[in-house]
Amino acid sequence: MVRHKDGMSRLVVFPLSFITCFLISEVKHSTNAEKIPGHRRPLGAHSKPYGVTVIGKFSSPQVFYGHFVKASKPIHMKSALTETKHPGLEWTDEYLRNHYGQEMVRVEIGKKEVRHRNAQWMRLNNFLSDYADNDLYMVNSIKDSMEGLVHIPSTLQCGGFEKGVMEAVLWMGRGPIHSVLHYDELENLLCVFDGAKDVILIDQFYKDKVESRGFVQEGHYSQVDPESVDMHRFPQFQNLPWYRVHLDAGDCLFIPYGWYHQVTSYGDRNLALNIWFSHIWWFNDDSCEDFSSFPHLKPLDKFGGFASPNEAVRSQWLEKFEGSDDDVDFKDFSRRVSSGTKDDLKKAFSFIDHDKDDSLSWEELTSFDINRGLLQYPSVFYSHSTSAKSEPAEESSSDAEDAAAGVSSHRIAAGQKHSKRDEL
Ligand SMILES: [Ca+2]
């Protein structure tokens, strides 16, 4: 009996001590977690978010350039697609199947983004049959016969934006779907046709903090788990200001290049399209003179399709002419370019100077054949970015009013508020 009793007490004592240890460790863990705001919580839980400027339509190109592109600030164009009756709002599964069913599309497996994972290619028909029941997410860069899906909003139809539309991606799946925290090298207009998205944005000004640990430079993304931030591994996230934007179907969001963003997509059917375009260093107001007569949306093929990838090189090269209000003569040209032999500079100058008046106009600088230029004078056109980082601008409540009222300007010279653009 005694032996039995001892056995019983051992049996009871062991689990009790195990549970006690477990409880103590849990209490200790939760005490630590309470001390570190946001630890093991979703990205952004560490502090209250800031909001971004909201307007109820597509911004005019002038306002968009002056207040958002040049200033490197996001803008939420709420209901812009609904206002302009964007056809994407009518892209049912049946519509997509009937028009593009045989197209091959790129599909990721899993609802949580893992970079460098192999994607699969499948016919759109097959994706549409399977996405509701399987962990499939279409992330498909639009090519050739699907280009009819891309409509350029009035915001990007002039000023120089229209020359640099580089790529569009169609995103589709059943939520929730989580992206990694990352940045892009191009300006991004993200538009939602069905479902909703929550976007977390972090100003590129905080590059040092975001990238100090667990950042994959090659892919421009952080290894932080957006669903559960480990503040021990990523302590720099504790003091990171962030912006939150909720996008419903019909909304678009401008994400400036270099800004970090993490996107969570919701809804049984989440459908979105984003347009990537080159940064422009100054704005050609003349080309926007007839803006009031522009259509709200214009098919991409009216602009000759996507721009050559070398347009991104031109965009970066044009940073050298930032702040130039007048046409550029050879002296100014060679001082600003400062690479290549004098002979090459002379030839390149002459190559760009289409009307041979010994000065380069905005039109000439943005229109010369960049593919040929890169082939013939690589030392002149391949070059490094020069601008330095600066403080992010304070949020201004008047932005939305300015945006709504419209701000006129003549060839706004790009300001000094850009962080260094990453090498392309
Ligand atoms: Ca000229």
Image: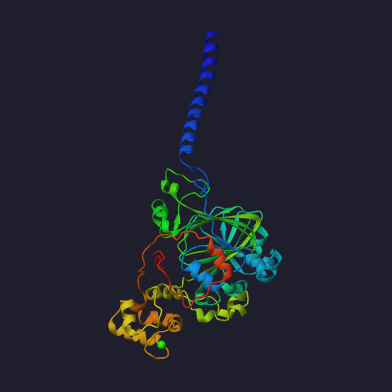
Residue 198 at x, y percent in the picture: 58, 55
Between 353 and 417, the one lying in front of the other is: 417
The residue furthest top is 1
Residue 321 at x, y percent in the picture: 38, 76
Q: Is residue 360 left or right of residue 189?
A: left
Above or below 150: residue 230? above
The residue furthest left is 342
Quarter holding ligand 1: bottom left
Q: Quadrant of residue 248?
A: bottom right
> What residue is rendered at 70% in x and 69% in y?
98
Q: Can residue 140 be seen in this view?
A: no
Residue 223 at x, y percent in the picture: 45, 52
Q: Is residue 193 left or right of residue 49?
A: right
Above or below 13: residue 367? below
> What residue is rendered at 47% in x and 64% in y?
72
Above or below 291: residue 55? above
Q: Quadrant of residue 132?
A: bottom right
Between 7 and 373, the one lying in front of the other is: 373
Q: Is residue 57 visible?
A: yes
> What residue is rendered at 40% in x and 75% in y?
318
- Quadrant in which the N terminus appears: top right
Above or below 116: residue 7? above
Q: Count up the numbered dots.
A: 0
Residue 414 at x, y percent in the picture: 43, 72
Q: Is residue 336 left or right of residue 372?
A: left
The residue furthest right is 94
- Quadrant in which the C terminus appears: bottom left
